[in-house]
Every structure is written in C-alpha cells, then in structure tokens.
Image: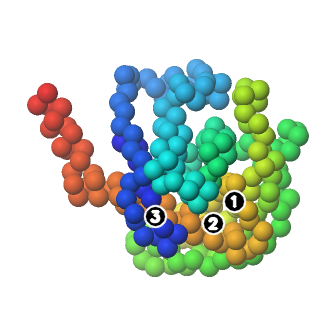
Amino acid sequence: MHSSLAVTIEGVPLGLAAVKFWTRKKFKGTAALKKKINPTRIPIEKKESVRWLENLKQSTQLLDHSERCIHIGDRESDIYELFCAAQEIGTHFLIRTCVDRLAGDGDHTIADEMDEVAVKGLHRIEVRDSNGDPDQAVLEIRYRKIRVLPPIGKQKRYPALTLTVIHAEERGTPKNRKKIDWKLITDLPVGSRSDAIEKLEWYGLRWKIEVFHKILKSGCKAEESKLRTAQRL
C-alpha cells in the first residue's frame, strides 16, 4: 500500500489523497537483479517507483488547485521523472534527496556546487535522542538555485530543471543519536534563511505519514489481517 496523506501547513491531517495497492510477481532475487542492471536506464513506467508519479497525479486531481499543493517525500521519492511530472501538472514538490545529480553544464555535480555555498543561517530545533529524551540541535543552513540535469541515459527525454537545493547539517556530533543531515530539493523559491526554515518545517510534517502507517500496522493489525485473509483463500 502506497498512500499520500494530505495535511495543512500547520500539520492538521485532512485524510488520504491517493492510495495505490500492488503486489510483486517475484519477491526473491530483486536485490541481486539491481546489481546487474542500470536502473537509471529503465523507463519509469516499467519500475515500481512509478507509484510515486501516479500518487502525485491522483492526489493533485483530487485536491484541485495544483499550484497550491506541495508534494513532500523521503529519499525513496528522489526521482527525476517525478520532478518533471510535477512541472507538467503545475504543482510543487519538496523531496529529501539522495542522488548527487549532474548540474550546470554537466561538468560537475550538485554536491560540487553546494560545497561552494557558505552557511547562510542557523536554526535551532527540538529533537529526541535514541532513549527518547529531549535534546536540541543547531542546524547550519545553506541553499542555492541550481540547474539540475536528468540522468545521462534519459537526457533526450527529459529537460534540465532549475531547482533549489537546501542543506541543513547539524553542528557538532550528538552522543545518543544520529547527526541530522538533511538535503532537500524543491521547485519552490528559497531566497532567505526564513524561506529555508519554512521548507525544513514543511518537510518535518512528512513524519505524520509514518505515524499513520504505524497505526495501521501496530494498532489496526492491518498486516496480520491481510495474512489471515490470504490463508483463508
């Protein structure tokens, strides 16, 4: 089950905006297969990750006013085709990135450009350590508008996009938790420290869908119910 949860910018849940159910024909050997092929050369329509594009389109159609929607996703949704689909529909996205894409004229990467950017502000946030105890983190914020290129094998099909990259890296090394290091990419304008902080806070709302899925699995026992149904069949 791949779902999209709609929330206001204040974090109030409005309900599910899109849901996709699917099953794999093959469960074993998929990890080994990835080592034999280049996933960037496979059309998105033939990959399971097309569900991200389908949910983007479905939720945008349901909510209407596509220009007022911001689609937020974790690193699994760092898909160039999704960026292009959002642009075609006229909607927006804010994604935690994991891919160091080619940038500019193609002779360097996003990371190369971000290494040149000075810290443009600090932001203090409340967090919890691995024991659940309250803690604080001071984030160094950097951002830059960058010309981002599609994967080499898909440059004939997809255009280059001008996007904004935001890096929020924690100062120092915390003792009882992982160091915060967020790298976000968005088509939204970011012209100041407050703009960048706003986008960081919006990305933080993504955790609500994790809670929703936890409720389904742990509270509603959704996976156990599915197993019992399968056994009866």
Mark 3 and mark 2: Cα distance apart in space: 15 Å
Percent position of residue 189, x then y: 73, 62
Residue 70 appears in the figure: no
Task: State the CA–CA distance, disc 1 to disc 3.
Answer: 18 Å
Left or right: where 127 falls relative to 25: right
| CB within 8 Å, label 2 to label 1 | yes
SS type, badge 2 = helix
What residue is disc 2 on? 199
Does residue 69 appear left or right of residue 104 in this picture?
A: left
Residue bearing the label numbered 3: 7
Q: CA distance from mark 2 to mark 1?
A: 9 Å
Q: Quadrant of residue 42?
A: top right
Q: Considering only order in the chain, which callout, 1 or 2, is on the residue closer to the N terminus?
A: 1
Which residue appears at 48% of the width and 28% of the height?
A: 31
Earlier-in-chain disc, 1 versus 3: 3
Nearer the camera: disc 3 or disc 2? 3
Disc 1: which residue: 188
User: Residue 160: image x %, image y %?
Assistant: 78, 40
